[in-house]
Structures are given as C-alpha cells and as structure tokens.
Image (cartoon, rainbow, N blue to C red):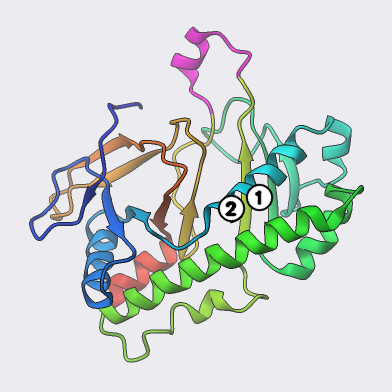
Amino acid sequence: MVVPSAAGREMAPESLPLGIIPTVDMSAPCGELARRLVRACAERGFFKAVNHGVPPRVSARMDAAASAFFARPGQAKQAAGPPDPLGYGSRNIGANGDVGELEYLILHADPGAVARKAKVIDKDDPSRFSVAVNEYVGAVRHLACRVLDLLGEGLGLRDPTSLSRLISAVDSDSLLRINHYPTSRSSAADISTKGIGFGEHTDPQILSLLRANDVDGLQVLLPDGHGGGDEQWVQVPADPSAFFINVGDLLQNNMILF
C-alpha cells in the first residue's frame, strides 16, 4: 500500500500526528537526546536519524563498492553465493509477499569474514571491497551502539551499556545486507497491482539501521503512539544523508519488560 509521503518532524513535547516519522538530531545534548530516542522508539518504533556522525565519504565508498559488485556479470556474482544464509542471492528472498526482481548480498559484520568473502567478490583487488565495507560497518556499528547506550540511559537501566554490548564485539551476530533493485522490466500496470520488493515483515534483531539512495520505496506501518490501535502505512521520504532506524522484535520485547 502506498500513501503520500509524510515529512519527518523533530520530536517535540506534544505527541506527533498519526503518519509522521519522527526525526531525531543525534547532535542534541545527551539528556535531551536520550529522552527523544526513547519516545521515538516507544511511540513509533521507527525514526530518522540526522547528524548521525557517519562520514559521507564512508557511505559513498560503500555505495561505490556495492554498485561495482552488482554491475558485474551474473556468473561472477553467483560465485559469492549461495546465500546459506550469507552470500549473494537474487529473486526469491523469503516467504510470502516477496515479489519482483531483487538481488542482495549478506555479509557478517566481522572484518575477517568480510576479507574472506572479498576474495570472490572482487578478485582483482579484494582489499578494495573489504576496506570500504569494514570502514562502513565500523561507523554504523558505532552509531548503533550510541543509540542503544542512549536508550539505556533514557530507560534508566542500571547498566546503560548492557544493550550495546550485544553488538559491540566484532564477532557479534550483526549482519550487513545490501539490497539492489534493478530497473523493472514489468509494465506499469504489473507494478501497480503486484508491487515490488519485500513483503510486509518485522525485523527480529535489536535494531536495523537503513540507508538508501534517493529513490522512494520503503514503507512502514506506524502506530498512533497512544495505544489506541490506529495504524497507518507511510511512505518513507528518501534521504541518502540520513539513517532510518527500526526497532527490532528483540528490543521491542525488552522495552516492554523494562
């Protein structure tokens, strides 16, 4: 379902209207920032992070490395698969609701694992790929840990770092997933009736940090934030300079327990 784009708004003291994606400025003072993050996660479970500290050059290098890989011939890309569960895959990406053309690369967010996979991803210069990916993963991991530490403070946890320690180690279960949606060969009618991409789903992990190019496509189901049961599908306005952060099932369940 596609609805008109809703502009993000900086979290304010009053409740946000239904269908608005909160924007959180990560450069705000820590106490205020912790409160805003808790509120965004509790009321919406999804927010836009700006001034997040991930350098644009790091994101640009990651984008260039990904684009170079997906531009390679199919046989060369298949050498990096199959996705069992890590590696290269295409088309059939999951269970019900996943349609259209899609290819993806799933990597363990561990420098050693990335370096090993880089030997088949970029045989000419494996370090070119691994350096770009590991630099990006390190910057995004730092952002994720900062968000979790601030949530720990805002929730009043005895040890505010207890959440971030789950992902701070390089050998954690963190993953990097790079999705590529090729230009569709379907007609406009097929696209409008069938849709393209992932079906409706939740993320099982703690957090998902999402970044895309300047093409709209991501949609989220936002609650009203008041416990009234109202929900609305919202088109997420594309912003390559921002990260969109989604609360995963594990963190959601823990926040309920807290």
Q: Which residue is drawn at 29% across and 58% down?
A: 24
| Residue 54: x %, y % from top left | 50, 60
Q: Give the Cα distance between marks 2 and 1.
A: 6 Å
**Is 195 one of the magenta-colored residues?**
yes
Quadrant that contains the N terminus = top left
Q: Residue 197 carries which label?
A: none
Q: Taking 112 as reference, is 165 above or below it? A: below
Percent from the top left, x then y, of residue 97? 51, 32
Q: How crowded is mark 2: few (under 14 residues within 10 Å), some or many (20 or more)?
A: few
Q: What element carries label 2?
A: helix
Instruction: Tell me if 72 is positioned left or right of 169 in this view.
Output: right
Q: In this view, does 95 lie above or below 119?
A: above
Asked where in the image residue 91 lies, by quadrant, the reply is top right
The extreme left residue here reads: 14
Residue 203's spot in the image, x, y percent?
47, 54
Which residue carries the number 2 mark?
Answer: 57
Q: Is residue 46 magenta?
A: no
Name, please, the residue furthest toward the front: 57
Q: In this view, does 79 lie to the left or right of 98?
A: right
Q: Give the range drawn in magenta.
A: 184-196
Q: Do the residues labelled 2 and 1 touch (CB within 8 Å)?
A: yes
The amino acid on which the numbered mark 1 sits, given as a three-letter code, is Arg
Amino acid type at mark 2: Arg
| Residue farthest to the right, as pictured | 124
The residue that appears at 28% across and 52% down in the rendered structure is 23
| Label 1 crowd bin: few (<14), some (14–19), many (20+), radius 10 Å | some
Q: Residue at 13% of width from left, 57% of height from top? A: 12
Q: Tell me: residue 227, above or below residue 111.
A: above
Position of residue 248 measured from the top left corner of the image (x, y, whole percent):
43, 60
Considering the image in quadrants, where does the C terminus appear? bottom left
Residue denoted by label 1: 61
Q: Element at badge 1?
A: helix
